Image: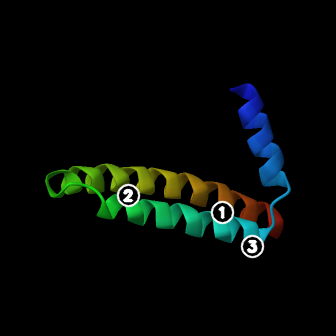
Amino acid sequence: MNKLVENAKSYINHMNIMDLGLLKLCLCSLGLILGTSMPQNSKKKVAAVSSVVFAFTYAALMVKFLGVLCKKEK
């Protein structure tokens, strides 16, 4: 598992902004495909869980991004 994480970090270090955009589009498309294939009775539960995950991950990313911006200004 550690080797997988090391390889992922190495790959991320070699990515440019276009690669990151493509990765985000790919993951968004996968989410849409999975969302449309969910049974109707479980869509509300999946939407609730995914909303919570989105909120926490977005907040974590923004804290890190704003920290970088603050360091650049100093």
Marks 1/3: CA distance?
21 Å
Residue type, label 3: Met
* Mark closer to the chain start, 2 or 1: 2
| Image location of residue 33, percent across then percent down | 40, 63
The residue at which mark 2 appears reads as 34
- The label on residue 18 is 3
Specify whether 57 is left or right of 70. left
Q: Nearer the viewer, mark 3 or mark 2?
A: 2
Question: Which of the two residues, 4 or 72, is positioned nearer the viewer here?
Answer: 4
Q: Nearer the viewer, mark 2 or mark 1?
A: 2
Residue type, label 1: Leu
Could you tell me which residue is drawn at 35 percent across and 56 percent down?
51
- Residue 10 shows up from this direction: yes
> What is the secondary structure assignment of the residue under circle 1?
helix
Marks 3/2: CA distance?
24 Å
- Residue 74 shows up from this direction: no
Residue extending furthest toward the top? 1
Above-or-below relation of 53 to 4: below
> What is the secondary structure assignment of the residue under circle 3?
helix
* Mark closer to the chain start, 1 or 3: 3
Marks 2/1: CA distance?
31 Å
| Image location of residue 34, percent across then percent down | 37, 57
Could you tell me which residue is drawn at 59 percent across and 56 percent down?
61
The residue at which mark 1 appears reads as 66
Question: Which of the image's four quarters has the N terminus?
Answer: top right
* Mark closer to the chain start, 3 or 2: 3
Residue type, label 2: Leu
Specify whether 3 is left or right of 43. right
- Label 1 crowd bin: few (<14), some (14–19), many (20+), radius 10 Å: few
Could you tell me which residue is drawn at 43 percent across and 60 percent down?
31
| Image location of residue 30, percent across then percent down | 48, 61
Q: Nearer the viewer, mark 1 or mark 3?
A: 3
